[in-house]
Amino acid sequence: MAIIAQESQRYSNVVKREEGANWGQCKKVVTINDAAATLQIGAVLGKVTATGKYKLCEASAADGSEVAVAVMVGDSRGHAMPVTLAANTDTKVLVLYRGPSAVSDKALSYGASIDTDAEKSAMYDQLAAVGIDVLTTI
C-alpha cells in the first residue's frame, strides 16, 4: 500500500499545558551539539556540564546529559518541526525548560539507552524537578 501522506509530530501532541505560553515563560532557545540525527519535537534533552550545550538524553551518558532537563518543541524560530543536526555542529532549538508545564509521555523521544520502565520513570522525575510534568496519555 502506498503512503499518501506523512506528517511529523504536532506541538499539541507534545505540550499539554504551559504557564504563560503567550509570553514564552517556560521556553527558551538553546544550543544542541550532538551526533548527526533528525530530532522530532518531543525529544528529551540533557545538558552537558562541561560545555553548557544540550544533547539527546541518554541513561548511559556520564557528561551531565544523562539528566533530563528540557524537551525540544521546535526550531530556533519557534516552528514546531523536526530539526536536522549535523555531527558535532552547534544547532539552535526551542525547548520547554521549566514549568509549570506538562507534556505527553507518548510524544516523548530519548536516547536508545533509556529502554526500561525504571529509566523512563527516573527521566520523568528529572523533568518534574524542573517543573515539567509528564502526563500519561492514550
Image: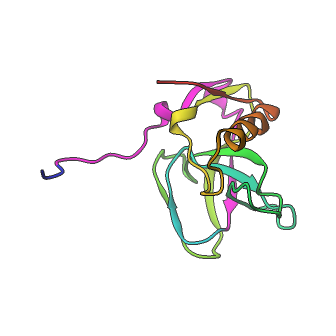
Name the side, left or right, on which 55 lies relative to 64.
Answer: left
As rendered, which of 66 and 22 lies closer to the eye? 66
| Residue at 71% in and 36% down | 121
Residue 35: percent from left, percent from top? 61, 71
Residue 48: percent from left, percent from top? 80, 61
- Residue 105 highlighted magenta (yes or no): no
Residue 12: percent from left, percent from top? 47, 30
Q: Residue furthest right?
A: 50
- The vertical placement of 132 against 84, above or below, is above
As rendered, which of 66 and 83 lies closer to the eye? 66
Q: How is the image coloured?
A: rainbow
Residue 63: percent from left, percent from top? 83, 64
As rendered, which of 89 and 38 lies closer to the eye? 38
| Magenta residue span | 4-33
Q: Residue furthest left?
A: 1
Total labels drawn? 0
| Residue at 74% in and 53% down | 46
| Residue at 77% in and 54% down | 66
- The vertical placement of 50 against 119, above or below, is below
- Residue 16 highlighted magenta (yes or no): yes
| Residue at 58% in and 54% down | 76
